[in-house]
Amino acid sequence: MVRLGAQMSFLALLALTAAVSSALGAEDSVGATKLKPDFYVNTCPKLPFIVLEKVDAAIKKESRMAASLLRLHFHDCFVQGCDASILLDDDSRLPLGEKTSPPNLNSVRGYEVIDDIKAAVEASCPKTVSCADITTLAAFWSVHLTGGPVWIPLFGRRDSLTANFSAALDFLPSPFSTNQGLKDGFKKVGLGVTNLVSLSGAHTLGFSRCAGLIPRLYNFNGTGLPDPTIEKGLLSTLQTTCPQGGDGNVTVPLDPTSKTFDNRYFKELLLFKGILNSDEVLFTQAKDTKGLVETYAKNQTRFFNDFSASMIKMGNMKPKTGKQGEIRLNCRKPNSLLLEDAEPLIQLVSDA
Ligand code: HEM
Ligand SMILES: *[C@@H]1O[C@H](CO)[C@@H](O)[C@H](O)[C@H]1NC(C)=O
Ligand SMILES: *[C@@H]1O[C@H](CO)[C@@H](O)[C@H](O)[C@H]1NC(C)=O
Ligand SMILES: *[C@@H]1O[C@H](CO)[C@@H](O)[C@H](O)[C@H]1NC(C)=O
Ligand SMILES: *[C@@H]1O[C@H](CO)[C@@H](O)[C@H](O)[C@H]1NC(C)=O
């Protein structure tokens, strides 16, 4: 049993559920589906706690896993909605998937942890809980267990039948984006400026590889010089860790308290100590985002509130319904392939 406090807070959230679920509207932007806080209350009542135990153990084993699971949910949602498309392994019988797309390759982590959670959930509630919902809940607990806020997470997503290599390229924002580029990228998936700045605060956790920094450190935007906005001390530290032509897989923390979900990230931006170009431009390139950075640096509660609301909005992106999706039994494969591959050893009954 881990973190009685965390379990209690989840129960408190569920108690609130009945009162708020109608008030929330719980409807995605298309208005097609209603994700609900209590979707699994009858069919898998232990779900939140199974996932909590597993995420807690994974973070104890490697603290960075909290960051990786949070990012996994984001990279899932931005590409054809939160549908676990990112979890599908490439297979010659499927369209080329997202795992090997440049924004994800050698970068996104946590797939084994999701497999492990899925196995535990299947053991307790077979064929009931989608991989997309497991990913959502893993991100939720990762934020809470590192000191961040809780909100009322919504469930009822179905898993995609395919993934899309080129959509990952089209929809995942680049760390080299300008402020306007970031705004455009978020707008394309229905998210606004407050969502952009508060969700960027996820970079309070975790690491970046040198690969995503080297252009900024040595040849910013083709100038042959470092980004002039990087604070000088940080620049020299980063240049030491990430030499030109060095190992692109070496990592640097995204803020100085990278195991703790707090508002330090925003305080660093005020000091021109943002790690990614896409971090610092929130402060340097536009008044609206700059104002929010200053607000969150001063007021962590405000950051936590906006972050929570934005996580719900991001989590509501294009949920699949009915035959558009399924409850995958193995997060890495659509059920149709699982059937083909398992034949004739196991007879799976399609629940579609
Ligand atoms: C605003 C646009 C964003 C850009 C351009 C961006 C880009 C990046 C990049 C380049 C990395 C380092 C990856 C690597 O080197 O392998 C990273 C890490 C990370 N990102 Fe973002 N990101 C953005 C928004 C978000 C959002 C919305 C979230 C979640 C809500 C998020 C969560 C994370 C986390 C937690 C990490 C650390 C992951 C780890 O240590 O495994 N990011 N991001
Ligand atoms: C994959 O995504 C691209 C957009 O990035 C879209 O044009 C294409 O239709 C998608 N392919 C499938 C099969 O959904
Ligand atoms: C890079 O340079 C181009 C053209 O000089 C400019 O339009 C663009 O905004 C610059 N990008 C950044 C990130 O500063
Ligand atoms: C990082 O590591 C991966 C896998 O170990 C390797 O394939 C890749 O080439 C490395 N990337 C860089 C930028 O060094
Ligand atoms: C911080 O933000 C919260 C939530 O928006 C607000 O209630 C509180 O008054 C703010 N605190 C300060 C010192 O401005």
Image (cartoon, grey):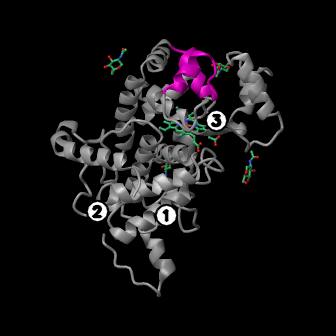
| x then y, percent, for residue 88 | 51, 60
Residue that badge 3 annotates: 253
- Residue 49 in the figure: left or right of residue 27: right
Disc 1 from disc 3: Cα separation: 26 Å
Above/below status of 185 relative to 155? above
Label 1: how many residues lie within 10 Å, few (<14), some (14-19) or many (20+)? some
Residue that badge 1 annotates: 116
| x then y, percent, for residue 340 | 48, 78
Q: Is residue 230 magenta?
A: no
Label 3: how many residues lie within 10 Å, few (<14), some (14-19) or many (20+)? some
Which quadrant, please, contains the N terminus?
A: bottom left
Label 2: how many residues lie within 10 Å, few (<14), some (14-19) or many (20+)? some
| x then y, percent, for residue 39 | 25, 54
| x then y, percent, for residue 109 | 58, 51
Q: Image point 78% across, 26% down: which residue? A: 218
Task: Find out whether the residues at labels 1 and 2 contact each other: C-beta distance under 8 Å.
Answer: no
Residue that badge 2 annotates: 44
- Residue 183 in the figure: left or right of residue 4: right
Q: Main secondary structure of the magenta part?
A: helix
Depth order, front residue of 39/262: 262
Mark 1 Cβ inside 8 Å of ligand 1: no
Q: Furthest residue to the bottom?
A: 344
Span shown in magenta: 263-286
Assign a secondary structure to mark 2.
Answer: loop
Q: Disc 3 marks which amino acid?
A: Pro
Question: Can the viewer see residue 120 in this picture?
Answer: yes
**Ligand 1 falls in which quarter?**
top right
Q: Image point 72% across, 37% down: which residue? A: 210
Above/below status of 237 relative to 272? below
Mark 2 Cβ inside 8 Å of ligand 1: no
